[in-house]
Image (cartoon, rainbow, N blue to C red):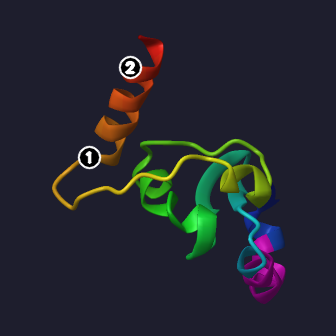
């Protein structure tokens, strides 16, 4: 995940959004603190955008090809994605 300052973002937001459209994730910082995360809206990263936005997960610096190797889960609307993930991890530990 790339990091840019608010100032850098404000100089050319179109270029930042173009980078996101190509699959890059960008953290926007102010005085060293992350104030926003720009994630692709579809594809591999799009699956995790809502969890990142809620603060449930935090993505590590990685490439989209790394994320393509992550398991996929069919999550019913009434089930927490985190609960499914934790149950899967618990099953792997047995």
Sequence order check, earlier mark of 1 and 2: 1
Which residue reaches farthest bottom?
14
Circle 1 Cα neighbour tier, 10 Å, few/some/many (<14 / 14–19 / ≥20): few
Q: Quadrant of the C terminus?
A: top left
Q: In the image, is 82 to the left or to the right of 80?
A: right
* Residue under the point 64% across and 50% down: 34
Q: Quadrant of residue 58?
A: top right
Nearer to us in this view, 14 or 76:
76
In this view, the residue in front, 20 or 70, is 70
Q: Which residue is mark 2?
A: 90
Q: Which residues are magenta?
A: 9-19
Residue 13 visible in the shown view: yes
Residue at 36 percent of width and 57 percent of height: 74
Number of on-image labels: 2
What is the quadrant of residue 46 in the picture?
bottom right
Asked if one can make out residue 38 in the rendered structure from this viewpoint, the answer is no
Give the Cα distance between marks 1 and 2: 16 Å
Does residue 23 appear to the left or right of 57 in the view shown?
right
Q: Residue 51 in the image: x percent, y percent?
A: 43, 52
Residue 27 x, y percent position in the rendering: 69, 57
Tell me, yes or no, whether the highlighted magenta stretch contains residue 7.
Answer: no
Residue placed most toward the observer, 22 or 3: 22
14 part of magenta stretch: yes
Question: As displayed, is residue 5 above or below residue 62?
Answer: below
SS at mark 2 in the image = helix
Q: Nearer the viewer, mark 1 or mark 2?
A: 2
Q: Which mark is residue 80?
A: 1
Main secondary structure found in the magenta portion: helix
50 w.r.t. 82: above or below: below
């Amino acid at each position: 995940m790339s990091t840019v300052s608010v100032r850098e973002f404000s100089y050319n937001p179109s270029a930042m959004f173009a980078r996101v459209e190509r699959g890059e994730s960008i953290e926007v910082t102010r005085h060293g603190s992350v104030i926003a995360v720009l994630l692709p809206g579809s594809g591999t990263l799009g699956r995790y955008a809502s969890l990142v936005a809620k603060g449930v997960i935090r993505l590590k610096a990685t490439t989209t090809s790394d994320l393509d190797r992550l398991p996929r889960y069919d999550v019913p609307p009434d089930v927490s994605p985190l609960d499914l993930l934790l149950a899967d991890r618990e099953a792997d530990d047995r």
